[in-house]
Amino acid sequence: MAHPAEMQASPPRIIMKGEGVHVTDLDGRTVLDAVGGLWNVNLGYSCDPIKQAIAAQLAVLPYYSGFRGTSTGPSIELAWELAQWFAPEGMVRTFFTSGGSDSVESALRLARQYWKIRGERDRTKFIALKKGYHGTHFGGASVNGNANFRRNYEPLLPGVFHTPVPWTYRNPFGETDPARLADLCARALEDEIAFQGPDTVAAFIMEPVLGAGGVIVPHESFMRRVREICDRHGILLIADEVVTGFGRAGAWSGSRLWGVKPDFMTLAKAITSGYYPLGATMIGQKVAEVFEADKTAFG
């Protein structure tokens, strides 16, 4: 996210130590890490129970492949735990990944595959919010709603479209009332769906609270309106919870904060408090049933 020449002209601060909510740099200066790493160190630095759990697992089984036909005890246990934690959101299955970008990429792929299994092969398009951020992989960059994270890699994935975000600071409607703005943005989404053709749209993806786009908190009605619109047009809803998951937004997930059950949830960051790379794409009951009833190869 930084130009190499910029780093040479102005060397980065080199962090050497973290303890609790503070980090210390190479020159011995200690500062409060108010962001928590990159919104991921939810349990603080040098947390002893986490370090002890990692060391205990390394001593028994540091790694094993989860490729077709094998699994591990800890992955099964964690999948079960996640299903319990996110039962209010309707999540029943977990597809583990190596991070947030992987989780988004997996959700996009699974959404397209879902419709192919259903026999609706024209449902390939994705709609996302302007100012949204969904990672650095090709699909994630394509649904990103900020040109800074797109332009250098274009042309990106075809069939991706963006609608206005309910941001009272800057929006195309000049609207400053959060509730009215949420309504206008929901109408814009519905208009875009109608323009594209509802039977060509696979999924709508959004962050319940937009992070990198400016920490944009939509009105409480917005995500519920999005869920209702998606249901009416048979479109899957992907909640990108990479930042908002595990309490960052004040509830266990951003979806729970707004009272919404998505079809997919993407998780990462605080799932390990940033101590090692891990992510997950969680799947709702409706989607899981279609995959589990399908007799074709899964890939």
Image: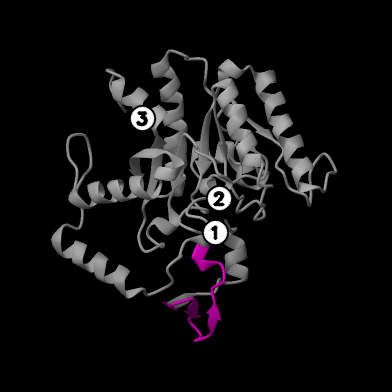
Q: Give the residue pinned by disc 1.
A: 250
Q: Residue at x 51, y 36 (%)?
A: 238
Q: Amino acid at mark 2?
A: Leu
Q: Quadrant of residue 289?
A: top left
Q: What residue range appears in magenta?
A: 18-38
Q: Earlier in the sequence, mark 1 or mark 3?
A: 1
Residue 23 among those drawn in magenta: yes
Q: Is residue 249 visible?
A: yes
Q: Residue at x 73, y 30 (%)?
A: 187
- Of residues 276 and 73, the one nearer the viewer is 73
Left of 98 or right of it: where is 236?
right
Q: Quadrant of residue 224?
A: top right
Judged from this view, the residue extending furthest toward the right is 174
In whole angstroms, how far apart are the C-alphas of marks 2 and 3? Answer: 24 Å
Q: Which numbered mark, 2 or 3, is in the foreground of this view?
A: 2
Q: Residue at x 72, y 40 (%)?
A: 182
Label 1 secondary element: loop
Q: Is residue 155 visible?
A: no
Marks 2/3 in contact by CB < 8 Å: the verdict is: no
Q: Give the residue pinned by disc 2.
A: 257
Crowding near the residue tagged with mark 1, few <14, some 14–19, many ≥20 C-alpha atoms within 10 Å: few
Label 2 secondary element: helix
> Where residue 1 sits in the image (x, y, percent)?
57, 56
Q: Give the residue pinned by disc 3.
A: 288
Marks 1/2 in contact by CB < 8 Å: the verdict is: yes
> Where residue 93 sits in the image (x, y, percent)?
34, 38
- Of residues 225 and 52, the one nearer the viewer is 225
Q: Residue at x 44, y 77 (%)?
A: 20
Q: Amino acid at mark 1?
A: Gly
